[in-house]
Amino acid sequence: SSEELDYDHACIHLPQKPGVYLVYDRKQKKHIYAGKALDIQKRIQQHAQRQNRLFGFSSQPIQKCLIDKKRCADSREAQEYLSKNCTVRHLVVPDEKRRKQPWKKRSLLEHYAICVIEPEYNFSGEFEH
């Protein structure tokens, strides 16, 4: 388990390595997202980038869900929400370059995290609880 970092701090200090990450919402008192990335720091930064609703939220699913669930009105509010209320934990996947299928361990860890914590924001509306 890694140190829990405030979202803004995570955007700067997470490793630029492959792994999985969990986003925890202190306000809702639950994990809201689990993901995997080749560069954890870059991916966390992408989640917080400003997004125009006209072009979709394909790279910022956390923002999309915050807006869809009426917790935020737009991308700007979603960015502020992440900054004020969320923390990030991560796990680096070591020795990925030596594996035949380097993505496989990250995918398995991400799926495990989703199954354990059941973050509702990882699913589209068709899977609503």
Image (tube, helix red, strand yellow):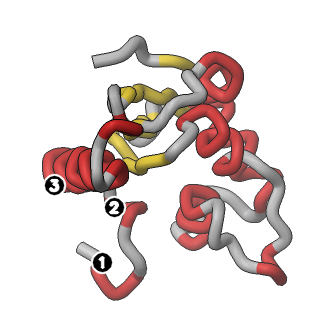
Residue 27 in the image: above or below residue 114? above
Residue 58 in the image: above or below residue 110? below
| Residue found at the very far top of the displayed protein | 3
Does residue 78 show up? yes
Does residue 110 show up? no
Task: Give the spatial CA distance, label 3 vs label 2.
Answer: 11 Å
Kindly identify which residue carries mark 3. Answer: 115
Kindly identify which residue carries mark 2. Answer: 120
Q: Residue type at mark 3: give it.
A: Cys
Q: Secondary structure at mark 3?
A: helix
Residue 40 position in % (x across, y down): 54, 36
Task: Give the spatial CA distance, label 1 vs label 3.
Answer: 15 Å
In this figure, what is the number of numbered marks? Answer: 3
Mark 2 and mark 1 residues within 8 Å of each other at the beta carbon: yes
Q: Is residue 39 left or right of residue 53?
A: left
First along the sequence among labels 3 and 2: 3
Q: Residue at x 63, y 72 (%)?
A: 58
Return the mark for residue 128: 1
Residue 115 position in % (x across, y down): 16, 55
Q: Residue at x 29, y 44 (%)?
A: 99
Q: Residue type at mark 1: give it.
A: Glu
Q: Residue type at mark 2: give it.
A: Glu
